[in-house]
Structures are given as C-alpha cells and as structure tokens.
Amino acid sequence: MADPIASPVETVHLKRSLGRSDLIALFVVAVFNLNVVPSIAANGGVTVWLWLISLVLFFWPQGIAVIELAHRYPGEGGVYLWAKEVFGDFHGFLSGWCYWTNNMMYVPTVMLYFVGVSVFVLGPGHAALADNKIFTVVASVGLMALLVILNIVGLGVGKWINNLGGIGTAIAAAVLIGLGVIVFAKFGTTVTAADFRIPPNPRFVLNSFGVICFGLVGLELASVMGDEIKDPQKTLPGAVAWGGILSGVMYIATTLTLLIAVSKNDINVLQGIVQAVSHMASRVGADWIIAPFALMLSISIAGIGSAWLAGSARIPFVAGLDSYMPSWLGKTHTRFATPYMALIVQGVVSIILVIVNAVGSGVQETFQRLLSLAVVLQLVPFLYMFAALLKIAVNPNSGKGLYSKTTLILAGGSGLLTTTLGIVLAFFPAQQIKSLLSYEMWMFGGTLFFIGLAVFFFYEYGRRKAPAVRRA
C-alpha cells in the first residue's frame, strides 16, 4: 500500500525520440557489454554453463517482467515506477535509488574499460598506458564530460551515440567470433572437455555468476525512458525480443571465442577482448586489423556508457519530481527538455569514484571492485521487479495483463531465485582481488552506505513533503 504522503508527480513532457530500431540498438548496447566478458571468461569454460542457466532462469523472466510491467504501468521511471505502484513509495524509491547508484559504480568501469581498449588504437606498443593511473583518470574524465554534454543536448542527439555503440558492438563481436572460427579451423584449440567442468576450488567462479546476471540486465532500460518511446505498446515487445536474442547469442559466442584464443590464466579483465583479437590476428597474419578493431570497440564502449548514463539519470529526475530527493534534480533544460541536473550529478559522482578508486588500487582491481558492488546494487531493483510479477499473479484484483497467471508465477519465481543467488555470490571475491578483508569491507560497507543513504533521503524529504501535501 502506498504511503499516505504520496502525491501525483508533476507533469513534465519529454520528447518521444526512440523508435523500434533505436530500442533494439539500445538493448544490444546496454545488455551485450563486451567489457564484462573477459572477467567472466577468466574463470574458464564452466562459465558457459552459467551463461545458459542465467539466460533461461534470469534473462527470459526479465523479458516477461519488462513487457508485462511496462504494459501495466507505462511512463517515465521504469523500475522506480513499477516498485512504487506495486509495493508503495518507499520501495519504489529504494528500487530506483539502487538502480541509479549502481550506475555510479558501473559507468566508471565503462570508462576504465574504454581507456584499456582505446590505447590499442595508437598501436600495441601503447597498451601499457592503460595501467598508468594519471592517464586513466584524465581519459576517463574527458569521456564522461563528453557523454554528459551530448545527453544534455538530448536523446535526439545522444541516441546516435547509443546507436553507433550498438553497431560498433555488433561489428566488434562479429570480428572476434570470425577470427575465432578461422583460428579454430586452421589450428584447432587447446580447450578440452575438462575446461568445462566445475573446478575443485570454485570460489572465483561463484563471483562470475553475479557478474553474468549483471551482464544480462538492460531490457528494462528503455522503460526507464518510457515517455520518450514512440508508440511504446507496439514498439517495446518486439524490440525486447530481438534485443534479448541477439545479446544472448553474442555473449556465449564471445566467451567461447575468448577461451579459444587466450588461456584463462592470461586474460586481462580490461584488455581481454583486444588481447584475444591481437593474438588471433597475429596467428593468421592479419595484424593490421588490431587498430581499427580497437577503434570500433572504443565506439561501442562509449555507447554503453552513454546508454547507462542517460537511462539511470532518469531515476533521480523522477525522484526529484516526487520530492523524495532535492527538487532541483527534477529540473529539465529550458532549451533541450532533458533532465540536465540529474545527468550532471551522475557524471560528477562517477568521476569522483574513478579518481578515488584509481588512487587507492591497481586499475584492474579497481575495475573489479567497482563492478562487484555495482552487481549488488543493480540486482536489488530486480528483486522488486520479479516480486511484483508474483504479487500481480496472486492478486485476483490485478486485472488482465499480457501474460497468464502461470507464466507470471514461473517468470517471477525463477527470476527472484536467480537474482537473490546473484547478489549473494557477488560477495565472493574475483581472482583479481588482492585483499579479502578490504574487499568484504568495501562490499558490505558500500551496500549498507548506499541503502542507508536511500532511507535518509526518503524519510527526510518525505517528512518535509507531508506538510506541503496537507497545505495543498
């Protein structure tokens, strides 16, 4: 039941700029993130089974949930709006808050990955620049500033970064897979059936399950921008289906290709994709391809950063309109009609996190620490999303939707179980982590800090909101 202090959100009209092809490109660039593949493939062939399990038990239910909830509760806000409508204001705020703050962790990992890949455009001899902390910070800040400016100008402009990112992702994946097929045909592979078995010590593999679930999120991203989709009732279902199929196939194919090209013990979590292409290209005499491939992948990564920056910034925008965060976050640009203050805050916080973590740890460990905390915060809204399906299914007054009660129960139950498991397993450290104590302090401390901050904002601003509602 919604809290009694709830009030209607102020009506703000955003431009409907996203068509079906835009949405498919957005889903591909948001869901299929090549930057998480190396950290997963580093755990060996057993991760292929984890991909398959996650696609069936997490990704399929996610598609059902997005289509059903977007149909029942259309509008700007996505996971924020859905949890709010089904469970009440606080749960909506917490869901949206975790969705937003996870991207404060995730977008910096995208910046770090961009740096790790883009240096290959200058030639393999410059690869060591990716481990230079000063260079990493300067390049990350520059890209972040550019993406913020483009998205303030508007989705009409910013969406082309997403679209170019989607095209770049598809081309990069095709080159990687194509080289893998050529190398396999000419030289065979050192990968054996034993590589697909569960290792005697599965501790590092456990973390990768949470990262895989994290890698498969993104179908809900367009619904966060629900008021900016052209004819969403007709456009969204088909775009979800095509985006999901393309992303799932490419994830499994690129993981297998990476394992064929590079030993799992030699995979670099920041440069693993270019590393694999470089290794395979040299074997078939096509070294010329490395620099253009790195350029294409860099464009793809910029698109990933733009998609998540734009989508997640809509959460504090809606929360500002709801008066559960400072009202200035709900402001739109007078010329471009975009949530510019929320975008600026998102960019500034992400830049700060890049600087703080890069100073304290190595670049690869920084990437993994930010990624693991992002996994936990990102999956919290999915607990609400799948629980909402179950609540709708068992509520006789919920009305008719797109899917049957049985489908909603199966999707909700499966998704809720795998999401919970993904959160728990993210607390197991990946192999790049040097200090277990420092990692667990970061994970538990970071999770409690951000959730505690959500409670503070909700009840502090809710307390201020109540008198204003009564006066009205």
Image (cartoon, helix red, strand yellow):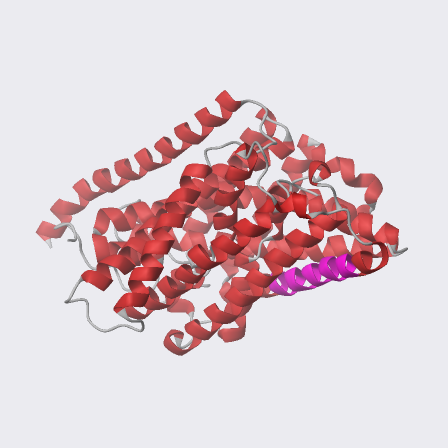
Taking the image as shown, residue 73 lies to the left or right of residue 441, namely left
Q: Nearer the viewer, residue 359 or 12?
A: 359
Counting from the top left corner in percent of width and height, residue 10 is at 26, 60
Q: Quadrant of residue 392?
A: bottom left
Relative to 169, say whether 373 is above or below: above
Q: Quadrant of residue 204?
A: top right
Is residue 174 on the magenta stretch? yes
Counting from the top left corner in percent of width and height, residue 82 is at 29, 58
Counting from the top left corner in percent of width and height, residue 315 is at 37, 52
Q: Quadrant of residue 311?
A: bottom left
Q: Main secondary structure of the magenta part?
A: helix
Q: Residue at x 43, y 55 (%)?
A: 58
Q: Which residues are magenta?
A: 164-181
Residue 149 in view of the camera: no
The count of marks equals 0
Relative to 191, say whether 391 is above or below: below
Is residue 371 on the magenta stretch? no
Q: Nearer the viewer, residue 380 or 231?
A: 380
User: Residue lying farthest right?
Assistant: 285
Q: Residue at x 48, y 70 (%)?
A: 241
Query: Which image quarter is the C terminus in?
Result: bottom left
Q: Nearer the viewer, residue 276 or 257?
A: 257
Taking the image as shown, residue 437 lies to the left or right of residue 192, namely left
Residue 437 in view of the camera: yes
User: Residue lying farthest left?
Assistant: 470
Counting from the top left corner in percent of width and height, residue 278 is at 80, 49
Relative to 87, say whether 109 is above or below: above
